[in-house]
Image (tube, rainbow, N blue to C red):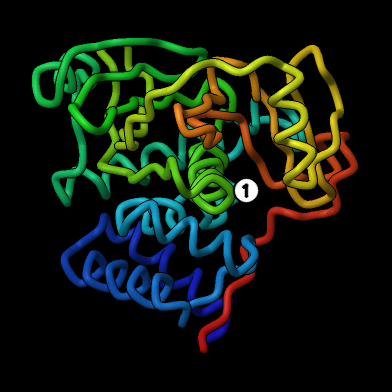
Amino acid sequence: MTKEDFWTSVENIIADGFRLEGLEKLEYYADKFIRNQLIYKRFSPFEQHGCADGGVIHVVASLLSGAEVGTDKLTASEGSFKREQQCGKIQENRIELWSKKNSYWIDNVDETISKTFGSYIAEGGEARVYDHGNTIIKTIGLDYFVQPVLALDRISLHNAYFPETKMTVLGFGRTSDGDFKIIVEQTFIQGERMEDAEIDKYAKSLGFNLINSKNWTYATPEIYLSDLHDENVIKSKKGNIFVVDCDIRINTPELKCGGVRSLTNEVYFL
C-alpha cells in the first residue's frame, strides 16, 4: 500500500461517517502501527513507540487528525492563524464523530470526570487534573496547540522522551462551554520541586540547549521543549527526576529554535 492509498483509505473512512467496516480498518491500521509494520515518518522509530504507548485510541486519533484537510474546506488565507483554527475544528470533528461511534466520548467532560474518576485537585495553563488513586486523570485542552494533531504529537513525544510518566489516552470530550478536551491517565509521582538550576542541569544532561530562561525553553535540532519549570519537574525521595508535564514539540524551523524537522505525513508498510 502506497502513502496515497493509505491516506485515501483514511479519508474515505472519514467521508463515509465511520461505518463498521471503516472502524475495523482503523483498528487494523492501529495494530500495524503498534507492531511497527506501518511506519509513520512524522516520528523517529522511538517516537512512534511513544505514540503506541499512548494506546490504540491515541494512535487512531493521531492518524485521523494527521489526514490532510481539503483546501475546499478552508476559507481563511494560507498561513493565517484563522486557517490553523479551521484545520483544528475539522480535526476535532473527525475525532468526535469517531469517538462517539466507539463510546470514547464524554460530554460535559469536567463534571463527568470528577464523578467517574475522582476529585479535582489542580489546574494548569491547558489541563485540569483529577485524583484517581495511584494515577491521575488529566483533561487537556488545545490552548497551546490549536490543532488536535499537535496536542496528540505532544503526548507521543512525552511518552518517548519521558516514559516514566507516560500518558495513556482514554478518550475525548467537550466542556459545557464546548471546548475540546483530550482525556489521559498518568502515573502519580510524589516528590519535591526542583530549583531552576537543577532543572537546567537535567535538561542539558539530556542534550537540550537553553533557548529562553524566561519561559524555560530548551531545544535540540529535533525537539522543542518548553514550560520546564518547578511545577512540571519533580525529584523523588530517591533522587530520581520526573518530568510530569511540559510543552514538547517536533522542532520545525517555524518555531525559530534551530529546528530542522518537518511535519510530514509520509507512511509506508513493511
Counting other residues with Cα less than 10 Å from the Cα at mark 1, is it few (<14), some (14-19), or many (20 or more)? few
Q: State which quadrant residue 147 falls in.
A: top right
Q: State which quadrant residue 15 falls in.
A: bottom left
- Amino acid under label 1? Thr
Q: Position of residue 199 (x, y in %)?
A: 69, 26
Q: Residue 159 vs residue 186: left or right?
A: right
Quickly name the residue at label 1. 71
Q: State which quadrant residue 24 falls in.
A: bottom left
Q: Is residue 35 above or below residue 238?
A: below
Picture mark count: 1
Q: Position of residue 187 (x, y in %)?
A: 33, 37
Q: Residue at x 85, y 30 (%)?
A: 210
Q: Residue at x 33, y 30 (%)?
A: 188
In this view, the residue in front, 175 or 237, is 237
Q: Residue at x 86, y 43 (%)?
A: 253
In this view, the residue in front, 248 or 8, is 248
Q: Position of residue 131 (x, y in %)?
A: 23, 20
Q: Is residue 203 above or below residue 196?
A: below
Q: Provide the secondary structure element on which disc 1 rests.
A: helix
Q: Residue 106 vs residue 155: left or right?
A: left
In this view, the residue in front, 213 or 16, is 213
Q: Residue at x 85, y 53 (%)?
A: 260
- The residue most toward the front is 238
